[in-house]
Image (cartoon, rainbow, N blue to C red):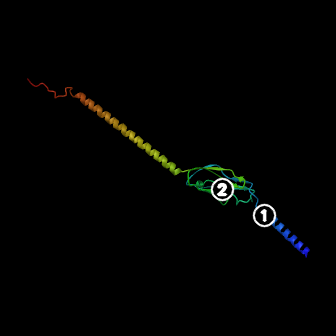
Amino acid sequence: MRRKDNVRRFLLSAALAALSLSACASAPPQVETITIDGEDLIMDISEEKAFSFDCQPADAQREELALKAPAQLGAELEDERIIIDPDAAGTFTLYLQSDAVTSNAITVTVIDSARIEAEKQAEEEARRRRQKAQEAEAAAQAEAAQQAQQEQAASQRTPASGGNAQTPGPR
């Protein structure tokens, strides 16, 4: 009976060993390199951009990938791509990480074109108002100078005595 127990134990041990070896062999390999395809970019806050990325080996376990990016960038992993839909203007850096492997970093500068255009229009309007005010002031000064000249000319035509000048009458 001992022999049967020993055989059973041996067969059970062998079966467990074979099962654990097959489980280890079928697990996907760990990520060795991560590369984000693309370069640093400038984008408008109203746009949405996507980057693809590559992991090596190709059959590596991608579930452990973590996207590192500030919340304002609105970045998320979706179907082997990084989708960017920003909430704020600024300069942000994003990268992927898996255990001890880190991808290349991408710098994304987000601008708000509508705000920039509105600021330009406001500056142009302010410049036009300043120019109009300067022109009005110059016209007022010219008018005041002309009026002063007319008053001076009028004062030179009147006699200096300040009274009524009488003309000699017939004698």
Residue at label 2?
67
Seen from this angle, which residue lies furthest top? 171
Q: Is residue 57 left or right of residue 137?
A: right
Quarter holding the C terminus is top left
Place of residue 125 in the rendered image (x, y in percent of width and height, measured from the top left): 44, 45
Q: Nearer the viewer, residue 65 or 114?
A: 65
Residue at label 1?
26
Q: Is residue 129 left or right of residue 47?
A: left
Q: Is residue 104 above or below residue 24?
A: above
What amino acid is at disc 1? Ser
| Residue 134 position by quadrant | top left
Seen from this angle, which residue lies furthest bottom? 1
Among the two numbered marks 1 and 2 on one chain, the one whose residue lies closer to the N terminus? 1
Q: Secondary structure at mark 2?
A: strand
Q: Which residue: 48% across, 49% down?
A: 118
Q: Is residue 7 above or below residue 154?
A: below
Q: Which residue: 32% across, 33% down?
A: 145
Place of residue 131 in the rendered image (x, y in percent of width and height, measured from the top left): 41, 40
| Residue 157 position by quadrant | top left
